[in-house]
Image (cartoon, rainbow, N blue to C red):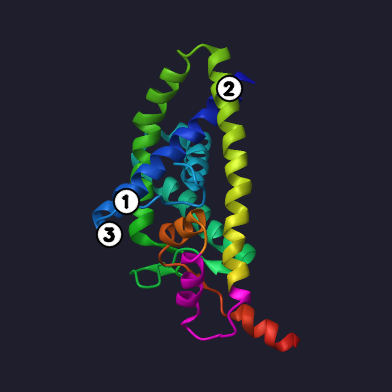
Amino acid sequence: MYKIFIYIALFFIFAFIGWIIEVINSLIVDKKFVNRGFLIGPVVPIYGFGGIAITLFLSRYSDEPITLFCMATIICSILEYFTSYFMEKIFNTRWWDYSNKKFNLNGRICLRNLAAFGLMGLVMVKYAVPFIINILEKIDPVLLKTIVSILLVIIMVDLCISTKIIYNVKTATLTIKDSTEEISAKVKEVLMKKGVFTRRVAHAFPDFRINTSFFKRVDKMK
């Protein structure tokens, strides 16, 4: 049971590091601070899940850097692709789109990002994970379990609130009687007029694109 709490703590650490990476990228590319990610808090869960998957499945390859890099790239590509796919199916929205990047697959993943994830996986398994686990194991078990439990409650509340906010995007699409390429911009205009958390989503995913096939299906049903 204690080991499970260690891995949950790792999840939060990886998710927080991912948030920092996304924020730094926004500062470099867009020259401004953007609270990136699906959740309101400073975590990006896909990094957490990716970090845990890499730790569980690839630790045995810590002395094989080439294998570790390739396997980390594969795991992250699968995770990012299907995260994009299922989020689009659930919310009728493509939250990120790499169609303008070279060597992309359906705009969901691209070679540049995957190479970066592979390198991160290599560094994580070989250096970061052993270092972090060593620190976590020095924390009093009761204290560690208490902190992790509190963080779990917070992230579950955040998840509920954020899911409700994200559904505002899907609701906004129903208020716009248009199926042109301009619909994403129109939805963004609607979102920017709503509450601060909803506006945060519009800023966090500036390249989101509404799946216009949704409207074609609705029109056929009429």
Query: Does residue 31 lie above or below 155 as drawn?
Result: below
Q: Which mark is residue 3?
A: 2
Residue 116 in the figure: left or right of residue 210: left
Residue 159 in the figure: left or right of residue 209: right
Residue type (three-letter) at the residue carrying disc 2: Lys
Q: Which one is closest to the eye, mark 2 or mark 1?
A: 1
Q: According to the image, label 3 marks what residue?
A: 30
Q: Residue at x 64, y 85 (%)?
A: 216
Q: How many marks?
A: 3
Query: Does residue 206 lie above or below 53 as drawn?
Result: below
Q: Residue at x 45, y 13 (%)?
A: 138
The residue segment tinted magenta is 173-193
Q: According to the image, label 1 marks what residue?
A: 33
Pointers 1 and 3 in contact (CB under 8 A)?
no
Q: Position of residue 173 (x, y in %)?
A: 59, 74
Question: Residue 24 lies in magenta, yes or no?
Answer: no
Q: Which mark is residue 128?
A: none
Q: Residue at x 61, y 68 (%)?
A: 170
Residue type (three-letter) at the residue carrying disc 1: Phe
